[in-house]
Amino acid sequence: MSDDDHHFESKADAGASKTFPQQAGTIRKNAYLVIKTRPCKVVEVSTSKTGKHGHAKCHFVAIDIFTGKKLEDIVPSSHNCDVPEVVRTDYQLIDISEDGFVSLLTENGDTKDDLRLPSDDQLLSQIKEGFKDGKDLVVTVMAAMGEEQICALKDVGPK
């Protein structure tokens, strides 16, 4: 067998994996974690002592980064947990349609039209008022595990 017998075509890009494993004992507060197939941000971690049956356990309390729901999980500290690949990207807001979708300008000049307005009332009103006033707005979109949502807003001044 020679070296040129093996040809691997990698179709993976930088975001090939939606999650990666991390040992439960190394996950801290404010880190991200997958609980019940949902990407979450850890708000509380407590570790129990090793008991009669072996492993020390980590108790995680976390908030779903998209829905805001509180989730909990208990994992042996030596076991691996799934950690979501969370990416934040800034886009310039171009337009808001009547059906609740936003039109965003990407860095390479294309438009992104597949995102809804956020469900958070305060952020929603800030975006609508700023757009109505003709301000130049930049929204931050958080993406994890195939989901995307507007999570922050920056005012870069008048147009």
Image: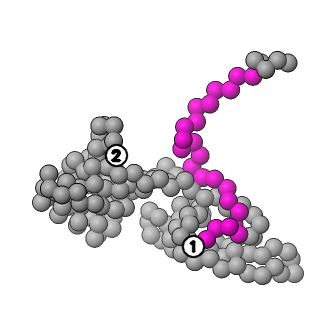
Q: With 88 as the anchor, is 122 left or right in this view?
A: left
Identify the amino acid type marked 1. Lys
Can you say whether 120 is above or below 92 in the image? below
Q: With 116 as the anchor, is 66 left or right in this view?
A: right
Q: Position of residue 97 (x, y in %)?
A: 21, 50
Residue 112: image quadrant is top left
Find out whether residue 19 is within the magenta segment.
yes
* Secondary structure of residue under mark 2: strand
Residue at the right extreme of this rendering = 52
Query: Is residue 21 visible in this depiction of the protein?
Result: yes
Query: Is residue 131 visible in this depiction of the protein?
Result: no
Query: What is the spatial separation of the Cα atoms under label 1 and label 2, in whole angstroms?
Result: 32 Å
**Residue 17 bears which disc, if any?**
none
Mark 1, residue position: 29
What stretch of residues is rendered in magenta?
Answer: 6-28
Q: Position of residue 28 (x, y in %)?
A: 61, 71
Q: Classify 10 Å Cα crowding around label 2: few (below 14), some (14-19), many (20 and above).
A: few
Residue found at x 23% / y 66%? 126
Quarter placement of the N terminus: top right
* Secondary structure of residue under mark 1: loop
Q: Nearer the viewer, mark 1 or mark 2?
A: 1
Q: Are marks 1 and 2 in contact (CB under 8 Å)?
A: no
Residue at the front extreme of this rendering = 157
Mark 2, residue position: 114
Find out whether residue 50 is within the magenta segment.
no
Q: Nearer the viewer, residue 130 or 159?
A: 159
Q: Classify 10 Å Cα crowding around label 1: few (below 14), some (14-19), many (20 and above).
A: some
Earlier sequence position, callout 1 versus callout 2? 1
Residue found at x 32% / y 49%? 91
Q: Position of residue 102 (x, y in %)?
A: 27, 50
